[in-house]
Image (tube, rainbow, N blue to C red):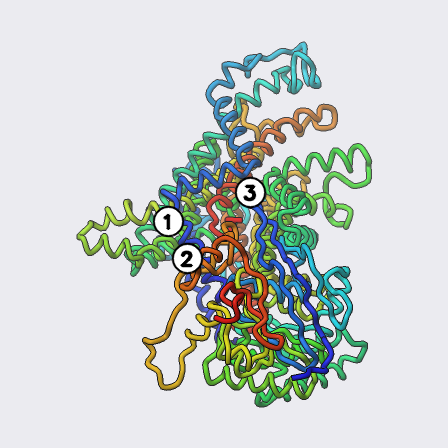
Amino acid sequence: MLRYTLKRIVGVIPTLIIVVTFVFFFVRMIPGDPARLVAGEQATLEDVESVREQLGLNQPIPVQYVKYVTGLVKGDLGMSLRTKRPVLTEVSARYGNTMALTVASLVWSTIVGVLLGVWSGKNRGKWQDFTGMTLAVSGISLPNFWIGFLLIMLFAVKLRWLPTTGAGSFKNLILPAITLGTSIAAIIARFTRSSIVEVLKEDYIRTARAKGLKEKTVTWGHAFRNSMISVVTVVGLQFGFLLGGSVVTEAVFAYPGLGQLLIESVNYRDYPAIQSLILIFSLQFIIINLVVDILYAILNPEIKLS
Amino acid sequence: MEDNRKNILEVKDLHTYFYTDSGVVKSVDGVDFVLKEGATLGIVGESGSGKSVTSLSIMGLLAGTTGRIAEGEILLEGRDIAHISEEEKRKMRGSQISMIFQEPMTSLNPVMKIGKQLTECILQHQDISKEEAYQKAEDMLRKTGVPRVEHMMKEYPFQLSGGQRQRVMIAMALVCRPKILIADEPTTALDVTIQAQILDLMNDLKKEIGTSILFITHDLGVVAEVCDEVVVMYCGRVVEKGDVYSLFAKPSHPYTIGLLNSIPKLGEAAEELEVIPGNVPNPKYMPKGCKFAPRCSRAFDKCMEEEPGFFTIGDGHVSRCWLCEKGGI
Amino acid sequence: MIGKKKAAHAELNEKTDIKTPVSEMIRKFKKQKNAVVALVFILFLVFLAFFGEALAPFKINEYDYSSILQGPSGAHWFGTDEFGRDLFSRIISGTKISLAVGLSAVSVGAICGTVLGLLGGYYRGIIDSIIMRICDTLFAFPGIILAIAIVAILGSGIGNVVIAVSVFSTPTFARLVRGRTLALKNSVFVQAAKNLGASDARILFRHILPGAIPEIIVQFTMSVGSSILTASSLSFLGMGAQPPTPEWGLLLANGRNYMMTSLHCTLFPGLAIFLTVLSFNILGDGLRDALDPKLTD
C-alpha cells in the first residue's frame, strides 16, 4: 500500500513539471508584445518598458523560468496587474468561497446521483430505469447558466425565498450549488447505474440472495459496496471538474470565487493572475486525481493488501 | 429395500418457463422427484437439461429473471414453497434450504471479509448477538477443515485458493443448519484432488448436521461416489431415475448409457471413451417425439412420433424410453 | 469465468451471422426509439442550419423600436429583444453557429486524436510516451479552464473557441484509439496482414482503424453535445461569439439584463441549447447501446 502510494506520488511529478512549464510559457505565447498589451494602447514607450520590467520580461527566458519556479516554491504567485496586490492574497480571499460551493455541490450531487443510479440500475429496463436515465441525460444536457437563471427567477424573484447573488451564508450557497451540481449528479447517476447493472450479474450477488439476505442488503451491502470502488473514482474526477466548472456558475450568481476572479482577470488581461489561476486549477485537478487513486486502493482490498 | 425415511422435499410435476421476447422457453417441463431425509439425490444432465433451473426454482431465485414456475408444486416437509411470497422465500433461503455454486472463484464477494460474509447469513436468520454469530461462523468454518481459521475470518476471498473458497462456501451454506443443501456442480471448477476432498467434506458434514443434499452435476462418476438416488434429466424432463445401485447396474435409457460410457474407467485407454453425438436441441425447436431421439443410435419410428411415458425397471427405478416398453433395453 | 466464456461464445456465434459491425450497429440502433427521434431532431437542426436564416420570418439584425422586449405572440413566437429583434428568427439562425462550432471542433479533435492514438498505440516506445504525456497534461486542466486559457491567449472570438474546444477534445480520442490499437495490434488478422507484407500505413488505416470506428462514432456524438455546451458557455462569458451574432449562449447572456421583465429572452435560447445538446447525448447513448455486444437481449 505504501509502495503503491509512493509510486503514484512519484508518477505525478513529471505531469506537475510539465504543467508548471506549460503555464510559464503560457504568458509568453500571447501574440504581440505582452508588455504592450498589458500597458495599453495609449501607453508611452517608458510605460511599456516599466511594465516589461515589472513582469520580468526583459530577462532571458531561462532566468525567468528559474525565477518563476523558485517563486512558486516560496508561494510567490506574482503581483496582480489589476489590483496591484499579490495574486496569492487575491486567491486566498476567494478560495474558501469556491471550495464551499464545490463541496456543497459535490455532496448533494453524489447523494442524489448514487440514489438515482442505484434505483435505475436495480430496476433495469423498467419505468424506474427509464425515468432515472431520462432525468440523467437531461441533467448532462442542461446549460448550467440557464438552470441558474431559471432558479433565480423562481426562487429569488418570484418566491423571494433565496438571495440572487453574493456569498457568505448558507442561503447564498443553495442556488449556485444546485446549478453547479446538476450535471455532476447526472454523470454520477449514469455511471452508478451502469456499474450496478454489471455488478448485479455477478455470481456473488446470487450467493447473497441464496443466503436469504434482504434485497436492501443485497443492493447496498453487496452490489453497491462493489460499485462504490469505481463510483468513488468518478466522484473524485467530478470534484476536479467542479472546481473548474464553477467559472460559469460563479458568473451567473456573481459569486466571489476563483472562477469569477479568472473571468475578471481575463477581461482585464491580468496575465500574472490568469497564469496563477490556471496553475491552481490544474494543480487541484492533479492532486484530486492522486487522492482518488489512493482512495481507490484503500477501497480495493486486493491493492491495499499487496 | 424398504425406505422409512420421511420425504423432506417433493418436486411434483414442476414446469418452469422463461418468457423471453422471442417466445416461451420451457426449461423445466414436468419434473418429479423426492428427496428423503438425510439422503443425497443426484440430478444429472448436460448443460441445458434444466437441472440448474430446477434448483433455482426450488431456491425461489427466479425473481428478477423472466422465469416463472408455470405449473407444479415444490413441497418442503409437505408445505408448498413454490407459491409463497417473495419475503417468505427469502426467509427460507439460507436457513431451510441453502445452495453452493459451481464457481467458487467468483461466488464470494471480493470486497468483504470472509468472517463478515459468514456472519451476515446467521444474523439475517437468527436473533443472536454479533459475537455469538461470529463464534458460530468460526466454528462452522473450522469444521470444513481449513487451516488457521481465526486468520481466515479476517481475510478477503482473493487471498484464498479455489478449494478453500469452496470450503468457505460450504461453511456459509451450512452455517444455519439448513434442512436441504443444493450443490450445483460444486466440484467442477476444482482440481481433481481437491474435488475428492470437497466431496468427502460434504458427506461428513451431511452426517454431522443432518442435512439432505440435492447434488447437481453432469458427472455420473461423482454421483456414484456421493449419491443414494439419481435423477437423469434431458431437455427439462426426467428420463430415468432410481437408486444409485440399480441405475448403475442396469442403466435403462440410451442417454444414461451414453453418459456412463463417457466416464473414463480405470484400465481402459482414453480413446475408447464414447461421446454422445450432437447437442442438446434448441428449446425453440423441440423434437416432437422423444426429445433424445435425434441423438439416439437406437431410435426407431415410434420414438420420432410419440413421447414415451415412464416404464418401471425395478423398485423405484423408471425410464422414459420406448425400448423399455417391452421389458428391457 | 464460465459466464464470461459463454458470453464470448455467444458473441462469436452472433458475429458469424452478420455482415459487418456497422450494419449490425445500424440494426440494433433502429430498436432504440429515443435515439431515432434524437437523430431526426438533429437532421432537422441541420436543415435549419442551412435554411434557417432564409426561412426566418424576420431579418435577424432588423431593429424595430416599436416592439421592444415583447413577450411571445402570434407575430413574434419567441418574443423580441431589447432592440425589437425577433427572437425566433435569431434562434433558428443561430443553429448553424452552434452546429458548426460543435461539429468542426470535435472533427478536428477526433482526427488529431485518432492519428495520435494510432501512432502511439502502434509504434509504442518514445512516440507513445510523448503522446501520452501530452494527453496527461491536457487532462490535468479542467476542460473549460483550458478553453478559457486558450481563448485568453488567442483572444475572444468564435474561431478561437473552435480551436480551444478541439484542443481539449483531442486527448479523449487519442486515448480511446490508442486503447483499441493496442488491442487490435496483436490480433490474428493484423498479424496475418503483416506477414503478407502490408505496409504500416495500410495496416493502420485499413485494418486497425475500422475496428476503432464504432467507438470513435459514439465518442464523437457525445463530444459534439458537450462541445456545444462549452462553446455556448464561453460565448455566455463574453469570450466566444461577439454581438450581434445570434449565438445562443450570447443571446442568453444578453437576455440576463432583462431577466426580471422579459423571461423569454433567457428561456428560449437556453431551451435551444438544451434540446440540441440533449439530442446529441441521446443519440450517443443509443449508438453506444447499439455497439455494446453485452446488450443483445
Q: Earlier in the sequence, mark 2 or mark 3?
A: 2
**Discs 1 and 3 share one subunit:** no
Q: CA distance from mark 1 to mark 3?
A: 60 Å
Which residue is under mark 2? A18
Nearer the observer: mark 2 or 1; the answer is 1
Picture disc at residue A265:
3
Q: Are marks 2 and 1 in contact (CB under 8 Å)?
A: no
SS for dot 3: helix
Estimate the spatial distance between the alpha carbons at disc 2 and disc 1, rounded to whole Å: 48 Å
Q: Is residue B52 visible?
A: no
Q: Which residue was labeled with disc 1?
A: C16
The chain that hosts pointer 2 is A
Q: Residue at x 45, y 55 (%)?
A: B301
- Vertical side of C274 occupied by A301: above or below: below
> Looking at the picture, which amino acid does disc 3 mark?
Ser
Residue extending furthest toward the left: C197
Q: Position of residue C152 (x, y in %)?
A: 48, 40
Residue type of the residue flagged with mark 2 = Ile
* Residue C30 vertical placement versus B124 (above, below): above
Between B57 and B271, the one nearer to me in the picture:
B271
